[in-house]
């Protein structure tokens, strides 16, 4: 189940709300509904509902392809996940070569995977979504366009994703 946490910004020293998924989302992943809802919401914020021209330039969307936030990880969600990871790789980041978003560790969107020592794509997506629409990101749990099931899931808070907590 997707959840929220609070963190202090590394550069701003400002208290911010962050969000994470508990299990992977994407091709061949567990695709728990609330986790998919959060990933779809962030993908939609970056690609379709973006208010930041810098993010628009870095992450051009798929023309004519809308991502519906419905909690189902179908072909359109898979395409956007793959597109995002391909675009991040083109920017010089090393990501695990799959079509999945894994939860990041220790509620740190800058954390590295333990074995490959690569950033988590979901951490990069979270940061891009925060820049794409800062106001919506900060108030995601109260925003009118946030899916009701996601709002409920985001009332949960914990220290780490369930995938890593034993």
Image (cartoon, rainbow, N blue to C red):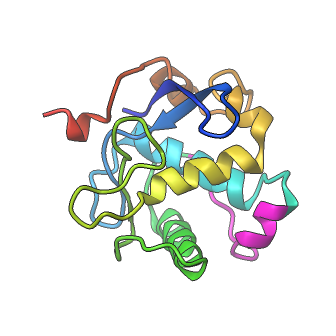
Rendered residue at 50%/73% (across/down) = 93
Give 70 or 54, whichever is nearer the viewer. 54
Give 145 or 82, whichever is nearer the viewer. 82
**Left or right placement of residue 95 versus residue 139 in this view:** left
Q: In this rendering, does residue 22 appear at all? A: yes
Magenta: main secondary structure equals: loop
x%, y% of residue 48? 75, 58
Asked if the magenta segment contains residue 58, the reply would be: yes
**Left or right placement of residue 36 versus residue 42 in this view:** left
x%, y% of residue 33? 40, 41
x%, y% of residue 162? 25, 34
Q: Quadrant of residue 43?
A: bottom right
Give, as a single range, the part of the protein colored magenta. Answer: 54-69
x%, y% of residue 99? 39, 70
Quadrant of the drawing holding the N terminus: top left
Give 111 or 102, whichever is nearer the viewer. 111
**Left or right placement of residue 30 versus residue 43 in this view:** left
- Farthest left residue in view: 166
Asked if the magenta segment contains residue 55, the reply would be: yes
Q: In this rendering, does residue 68 appear at all? A: no
Q: Quadrant of residue 12?
A: top right
Residue 37 higher or lower than 116, as above or below: above
- Farthest bottom residue in view: 90
Rendered residue at 66%/49% (across/down) = 129
């Amino acid at each position: 189940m997707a959840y929220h946490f609070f963190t202090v910004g590394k550069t701003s020293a400002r208290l911010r709300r962050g969000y994470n998924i508990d299990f992977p989302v994407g091709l061949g992943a567990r695709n728990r509904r609330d986790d998919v809802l959060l990933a779809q919401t962030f993908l939609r914020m970056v690609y379709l509902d973006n208010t930041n021209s810098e993010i628009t330039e870095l992450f051009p969307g798929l023309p004519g392809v809308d991502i519906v936030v419905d909690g189902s990880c179908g072909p359109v969600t898979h395409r956007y996940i793959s597109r995002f990871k391909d675009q991040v790789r083109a920017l010089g980041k090393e990501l695990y070569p799959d079509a999945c978003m894994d939860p990041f560790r220790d509620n740190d969107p800058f954390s590295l995977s333990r074995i490959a020592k690569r950033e988590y794509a979901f951490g990069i997506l979270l940061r891009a979504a925060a820049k794409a629409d800062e106001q919506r990101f900060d108030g995601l749990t109260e925003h009118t366009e946030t899916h009701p099931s996601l709002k409920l899931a985001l009332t949960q808070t914990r220290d780490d994703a369930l995938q890593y907590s034993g």
